[in-house]
Image (cartoon, helix red, strand yellow):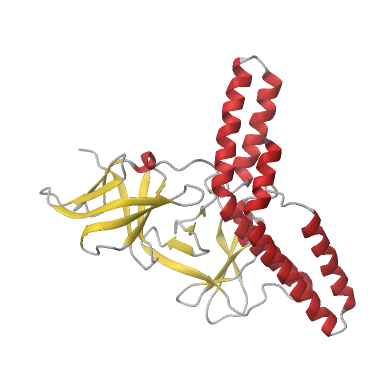
Amino acid sequence: MYQSYQTACNQRTQDAKTVYLNTLVSLQQECIARNDFSNAIILKKALEEAKNNPLDTTAAPAWQSLADIELKTPSKWVEKISSDGKFYQKSPTRNDFHLINEHIDIEKTTPELIIFTGDLRRKWLLVEGGSIAQICHRDTRVETLTPLAGVTQASGINGKLADAQKQYRMACSRVLAPLTAKFITALEKIQKQALASGKLDDCIQIKSYIDTLKNTSPGKATASISLIKGTWKDASNILTYDISNSGELVARTKNGQIEQQGQYVRSSPAGGYFIFKITQGKEKGEERILFPYDGKIYFLKADLSNWIRVLSPNSK
């Protein structure tokens, strides 16, 4: 089973690997053109390693693919995280980064939702297609983080190589999420069988491997709309939202009048959020992103504009 999983991983990541190899070839040609043969040799080794070795799908948590990548906010602040989860910011009027008293909460972070410590309740939602939605200011603001164009995230060939590797891993993380989720589910079934048969050592080994996959891979679990099923209310207590098992969403006013309706369309690659399409009412045809966190549902526009509703369970 493990070999089949690895083979499938290699097949799914072939496109990302081709882009990565082409990037390395381009960098190598740059070095040769300026007679920089020492760095050309470094890139040659990197090419050989990438061609001959399959991607290690348990090498690092998915969020580490963003480490040291500079991300710009609409207000021209620049943010980044380090490989150890620290958070840095640079204001529009300064040239240097400052360490902020926030860091990634490893225990709460999932493959598609990065949770930070601190009073601002900062969150990064990693959306399909490579977009990053930042939710901050205590769940009142949404903004898109954009990688700085034309800026080398680190100097020299080593820096460019590191950037290419990060982009490669990020691309792989996204395409492997659903495959890894299915593999984990299969392993959990085998673990139960081993436990029932009294094979305790096998059970412990399987659990250890499952834990490694859950903590380092892009896919933790199969998405289920039941995660957000129920009746919810927004902070204003004006609207209630009913979400059914079939994925129908109905927003009602206090007097029971239907304000808006929507329908579940699809889940994200790792099952961390759900896409709904508005089918009736204002903004018909638009899409919404819903994701559960900390007992609440976060309700965003799919275009990641500055609009957010945080829904809490409705206690009648």
Residue located farthest toward the bottom when viewing the structure as drawn:
34
Q: Position of residue 26 (x, y in %)?
A: 74, 75
Q: Is residue 237 above or below residue 90?
A: above
- Looking at the picture, tell me which residue is in the foreground, 280 or 150: 280
What residue appears at the point 64 percent right and 61 percent down from the top-left corner? Answer: 15
Q: Position of residue 307 (x, y in %)?
A: 33, 64
Q: Quadrant of the C terminus?
A: top left
Q: Is residue 298 above or below residue 69?
A: above
Side of 77 relative to 16 (left or right): left
Q: Which image quarter: residue 88? A: bottom right
Q: Position of residue 115 (x, y in %)?
A: 51, 53
Q: Is residue 85 visible?
A: no
- Looking at the picture, tell me which residue is in the foreground, 44 or 256: 44
Residue located farthest toward the left when viewing the structure as drawn:
255
Q: Is residue 280 above or below residue 270?
A: below
What residue appears at the point 82 percent right and 69 percent down from the top-left corner? Answer: 43
> How many marks on residues?
0
Side of 191 relative to 160 (left or right): left
Q: Quadrant of the N terminus?
A: top right
What residue appears at the point 62 percent right and 80 percent down from the top-left corner? Answer: 150
Q: Which image quarter: residue 190? A: top right
